[in-house]
Amino acid sequence: MDIAAFLLDSVPFARLLGITFDSVGPGAAVARLADRADLRNHVGGPHAGALFTLAETASGAALLSAFGDQLTRAVPLATGAAIRYLKLATGEVTAAATLRAAREEVVARLDVGERPEFEVGVEIRNAEGVVVTEMTVSWTLRPNREP
C-alpha cells in the first residue's frame, strides 16, 4: 500500500494544506509543509493549526505504516494530542513521527478483542534542523463491530 497516497486521499484537509511526504517506513514517517503566505499567522510563521495538522498527519502515516494490515478489523482513531510550540517556525517545516509502542503488543491486544491505545511522538523542525514544535498523538485501534 502507498501509505502517503492513501492518507492524502483519505484526509482532504491535509491535501488542502499541501502536506507532502519525504518517507514512510515501519512505525515512522516524515512529512513536509511548504512555506506559504496563506498558511502564516500574525507573526509570520505557519499557523498553529497548520503545524498541528502536519504533526497529526505524520503520526497517522507512522501508525498506518505499522498497522495498515489491521484496517480490515479495526479503525484507527486519534484520541488526544499534546503539543508544545517551542520556537517561532519560519519557512518550510518537516515533521518526523515515530511510533512509541511495540507492534506485537498492540496486535496482541487486538487479537484478544481489546482496544489498544498507544502514542506516536512527533518533532517538527525548521529548515535549519531546529526543533520548533513537539507533539504526542494518542491513538487507538477500535475493533470493527460485528454486523
Image (cartoon, rainbow, N blue to C red):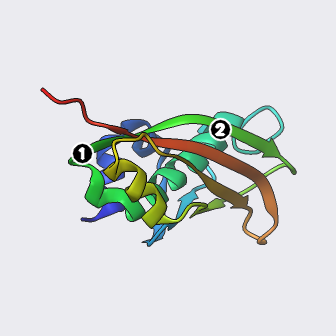
When asked about the image quadrant of residue 90, the answer is bottom right
What is the secondary structure assignment of the residue under circle 2? strand
Query: Which of the numbered marks, if any, corresponds to residue 81?
Result: 2
**Along the polypeptide, which appears first: circle 1 or circle 2?**
1
Instruction: Give the image location of residue 74, x and y in percent.
Output: 30, 43
Q: Is residue 105 visible?
A: yes
Name the mark nearer the viewer: 1 or 2.
1
**Vertical arrangement, residue 8 with respect to residue 77, above or below:** below
Mark 1 highlights which residue?
A: 73
Left/right placement of residue 6 relative to residue 109 reads left
Q: Residue at x 70, y 48 (%)?
A: 135
For label 1, count other residues whose C-alpha is less than 10 Å away and answer few (under 14), some (14-19) or many (20+). Answer: some
Left/right placement of residue 69 relative to residue 60 reads left
Q: Nearer the viewer, residue 41 or 118?
A: 118
For label 2, count other residues whose C-alpha is less than 10 Å away and answer few (under 14), some (14-19) or many (20+). Answer: some
Work out which residue is located at the far top of the displayed protein and give it.
147
Marks 1 and 2 in Cβ contact (< 8 Å): no
When asked about the image quadrant of residue 42, the answer is top right
Instruction: Give the image location of residue 114, x and y in percent.
Output: 40, 41
When asked about the image quadrant of residue 38, the answer is top right
Q: Residue at x 38, y 57 (%)?
A: 107
Instruction: Give the image location of residue 71, x and y in percent.
Output: 27, 49
Work out which residue is located at the far left of the displayed protein and give it.
147
What is the secondary structure assignment of the residue under circle 1? loop
Q: Residue at x 61, y 45 (%)?
A: 137
Q: Quadrant of the C terminus?
A: top left
**Vertical arrangement, residue 46 with respect to residue 100, above or below:** above
Question: Which kind of residue does numbered mark 1 sit on?
Answer: Arg
Instruction: Give the image location of residue 121, x and y in percent.
Output: 65, 56
Question: Which kind of residue does numbered mark 2 sit on?
Answer: Ala
Tag count in the figure? 2
Q: Nearer the viewer, residue 98 or 24?
A: 98
